[in-house]
Amino acid sequence: MNVRDLLPVLIYDDSCYYCSKFASIAKSLAGKNILIVGHYTKIGKEIKSEIFAKDYDSTRMFWFVTDKVAHGGRAGILPLVFFILKGKARKTPLRDMPLAYGTDCKTTRAFFMRVKTLLSNSQKIPLK
């Protein structure tokens, strides 16, 4: 699989309820212009294996990956929003992938912990 053909991609925590809702909103706004996959899905694991080092824990935050940079957590919010607002159409259309909806983290405390994690985690990884 060539990851470059799948970009841009949003990778989210598909075991978390609130993260799944976030991905659902992104999918409704972006349409088929962004591939949205879960951290724990087969395709998500394949994409992450090509982007991140084997010992790197990429599941700490969501990732918005473009052809130049993998934006993680807080650093991914603005690039994701700008991409959606631009409305850039993909060169090759994406097949519609169903979102996985997690049921963990459905409490109010878990919601605030996710917000705290989002605000405290931020990283950019240049792609080769």
Image (spheres, rainbow, N blue to C red):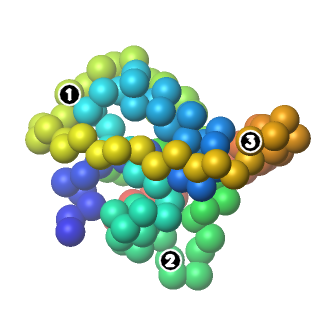
Q: Amino acid at mark 1?
A: Ala
Are the residues flagged by discs 2 and 3 in contact, CB closer than 8 Å? no
Q: Which residue is mark 3?
A: 106
Q: Are marks 2 and 1 in contact (CB under 8 Å)?
A: no
| Lower position in the chain sequence, tag 2 or tag 1 | 2
Q: Which amino acid type is marked by label 2?
A: Ala
Q: Quadrant of the N terminus?
A: bottom left
Q: Left or right of 74: which side holds 36? A: left
Q: Nearer the viewer, residue 57 or 66?
A: 57
In space, the residues marked 2 and 3 are separated at their CA atoms by 31 Å
Quick one: quadrant of the C terminus? Answer: bottom left
| Amino acid marked by disc 3 | Lys
Q: Mark 1 near mark 3, Cβ–Cβ under 8 Å?
A: no
Q: Residue at x 34, y 19 (%)?
A: 86
Q: Residues within 10 Å of mark 1 (few under 14, many from 20)?
A: some
Q: Is residue 51 above or below residue 84?
A: below
- Residue that mark 1 sits on: 89
In this picture, is 1 found above or below 98?
Answer: below
**Residue 3's spot in the image, x, y percent?**
27, 61
Give x and y (percent) for residue 109.
88, 41
Looking at this view, is 51 or 110 the one in front? 110
**Which element type, helix, strand or loop, lies under badge 1?**
loop
Q: Secondary structure at mark 2?
A: loop
Q: Which residue is mark 2?
A: 53
In primary-sequence order, the first of circles 1 and 3 is 1
